[in-house]
């Protein structure tokens, strides 16, 4: 399914904890904010379990993603004056017909911004109906005929278009489960049977957890490994020929939710990592 079928993403920031929502909005001059106290009802059916302030950030479009994150930057001074007892959470909500719409990406700058704001991340993914127009003259298989796939995995990677994989491995004191070098044969063209070569070198270090663990657990397991290598990571960050970060993949139920505590975001920021999650909705769930 194509990305243009019902695909959209929006975000909002919540502030929860003790206090009166309207008084906090007025005291901190939170523009565009809505607030409810515990027990209050919104839209005649949503009853709040705790005090909640919501600040809408709007749609996140690929061509203006920086403007979406910039709206968070404008809140930096205000949020940092709030007591730590008020929890801040960025909610990213994705709707899409494409099975790949379950994933998300956080750059180093995005992670550092969330860390500066002491803000957690909550990802919500929904797969909407496919309109059927991508593949004419076909029939849609029932879920029972679609192979069942499940599980999540994550790895720390180092890649470079300049260095050999053995040089990348020498930069970090952790064993890698996968590595290849620029110029290695990647695969053969199925028609001409000519070799297709790797265009970069790369090593990967897995989390060590089974596929039954969720992405948050995988990330925290990798952080436990990488925090002993902080000096090496900061040294690599000085070399613009090297890229590194955490990448994840897996199959998710519809809908899916993943919550990254503010402490996990802070740990990612301290190591200068990116977080790239390439997830797929599993229609057989």
Image (cartoon, rainbow, N blue to C red):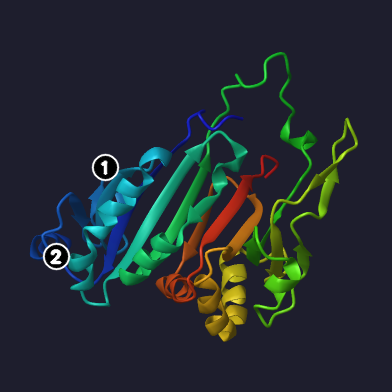
Q: Which residue is under mark 1?
A: 43
- Answer with the quarter of the image where residue 162 lies: bottom right
- In the displayed orientation, state which residue is furthest to the front: 162
Which is closer to the viewer, label 1 or label 2? 2
Residue at left 18%, top 66%? 78
Vertical position of residue 67 compared to residue 76: above or below: above
Vertical position of residue 4 compared to residue 107: above or below: above
Question: At which x and y percent is residue 79?
Answer: 22, 67
Question: At which x and y percent is residue 165?
Answer: 73, 67
Q: Nearer the viewer, residue 181 or 278?
A: 181
Question: At which x and y percent is residue 184?
Answer: 81, 55
Q: Would you say 242 lies left or right of 57 here?
A: right
Label 1 vs 2, first from the N-terminus: 2
Q: Would you say 72 lies left or right of 108 here?
A: left
Q: Which residue is under mark 2?
A: 24
**Circle 1: element type:** loop
Residue at left 67%, top 39%? 283
Question: At which x and y percent is residue 177?
Answer: 77, 69
Q: Would you say 25 lies left or right of 225 here?
A: left
Q: Are marks 1 and 2 in contact (CB under 8 Å)?
A: no
Residue at left 50%, top 47%? 125
Q: Specify the quadrant that holds the N terminus.
A: top right
Q: Nearer the viewer, residue 49 or 217?
A: 217
**Circle 2: element type:** helix
């Amino acid at each position: 399914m194509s990305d243009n079928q019902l695909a959209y993403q929006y975000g909002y920031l919540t502030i929860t904890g003790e206090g009166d929502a309207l008084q906090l909005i007025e005291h901190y001059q939170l523009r565009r904010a809505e607030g409810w106290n515990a027990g209050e009802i919104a839209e005649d059916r949503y009853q709040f379990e705790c005090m909640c302030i919501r600040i809408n950030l709007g749609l996140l479009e690929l061509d203006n993603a920086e403007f979406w994150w910039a709206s968070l930057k404008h809140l930096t001074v205000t949020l940092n004056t709030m007591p730590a007892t008020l929890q801040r959470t960025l909610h990213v909500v994705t709707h899409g017909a494409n099975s790949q719409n379950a994933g998300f990406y956080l750059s180093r700058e995005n992670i550092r911004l969330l860390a500066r704001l002491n803000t957690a991340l909550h990802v919500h993914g929904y797969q909407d109906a496919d309109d059927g127009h991508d593949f004419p003259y076909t029939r849609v298989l029932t879920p029972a005929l679609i192979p069942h796939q499940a599980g999540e995995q994550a790895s720390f990677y180092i890649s470079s278009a300049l260095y050999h994989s053995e040089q990348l491995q020498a930069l970090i004191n952790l064993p890698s489960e996968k590595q290849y070098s620029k110029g290695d044969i990647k695969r053969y063209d199925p028609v001409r049977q000519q070799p297709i070569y790797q265009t970069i070198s790369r090593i990967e270090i897995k989390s060590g957890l089974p596929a039954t663990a969720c992405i948050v657990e995988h990330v925290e397991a990798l952080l436990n490994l990488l925090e002993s290598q902080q000096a090496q990571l900061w040294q690599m960050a000085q070399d613009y020929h090297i890229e590194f970060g955490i990448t994840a993949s897996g199959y998710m139920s519809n809908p899916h939710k993943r919550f990254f505590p503010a402490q996990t975001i802070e740990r990612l920021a301290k190591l200068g990592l990116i977080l790239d999650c390439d997830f797929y909705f599993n229609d057989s769930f």
